Amino acid sequence: MPTVLLIDDDPTLCAVMGKAFGRRGYRALLAHDAEEAMALVEDPEVSLAVLDLRLAEHSGLRLITPLLSCKPQLRIVVLTGYASIATAVDAIKLGACHYLTKPAEVDDIIAAFGEAMVMPDGDAPIKPTSLERAEWEYIQATLQACEGNVSAAAKRLGLHRRTLQRKLQKRPSGLD
């Protein structure tokens, strides 16, 4: 029975995902913060991890390197409700095997463990990025650089904190 480590600060989502993995023949271990994740990854049966991009205390990206240092063969899928090209590239460069947006079906997550995400080869995109999407990605990159601190990101972007919060609640069209 494969064992998957689910790392998400939302206990309800984590429990629901754990049950869904269980119905598919997986043993699920649940962690709600970095400390729990680092303790549970030492289980010799853990070979897969689903990591939320936004954990309460910091970015989930900061956990990829320690998890892989502890268990180099670990396959990590990063799951996020705040997708951006910048964070996807960072996740893959750090060693995650895939990056998926929420809501993601458990079957999609399982499929992602079996396939490596293909990085762009540097060719120009066929369709140019919309201004709305470019703004979203820039905001996400700034938010990531500020370790999820909305006030600091708003200051860096020259926006009022509430304005940034409103922009974060909107997802640009075509961002799937």
Image (cartoon, helix red, strand yellow):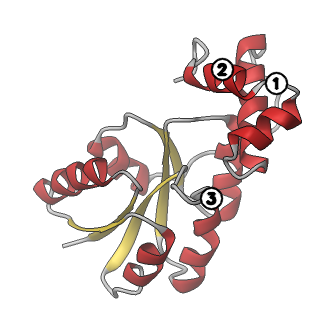
Crowdedness near tag 3: few (<14), some (14–19) or many (≥20) residues, C-alpha within 10 Å: many
Chain-order first, disc 3 or disc 1: 3
Q: Quadrant of the N terminus?
A: bottom left
Residue drawn where x is 42% and y is 83% of the image: 39
Residue 41, image quadrant: bottom left
How far is the residue under mark 3 from the one under mark 2? 22 Å
C-beta proximity under 8 Å, tags 3 and 1: no
Question: In the picture provided, is 10 more to the left or to the right than 61?
Answer: left
How far is the residue under mark 3 from the one under mark 1? 25 Å
In terms of secondary structure, where does tag 1 sit?
loop
What residue is pinned by disc 2? 167
Query: Viewer-proximal residue, 159 or 51?
Result: 159
Look at label 1 and name its amino acid: Leu
Question: In the picture provided, is 94 more to the left or to the right than 56?
Answer: right
C-beta proximity under 8 Å, tags 2 and 1: yes
Question: In the picture provided, is 90 more to the left or to the right than 68?
Answer: right
Chain-order first, disc 2 or disc 1: 1
In terms of secondary structure, where does tag 2 sit?
helix
What residue is pinned by disc 1? 159
Query: Viewer-proximal residue, 72 or 173?
Result: 173
Kindly identify which numbered label has been placed on residue 61: 3
Query: Viewer-proximal residue, 61 or 73?
Result: 61
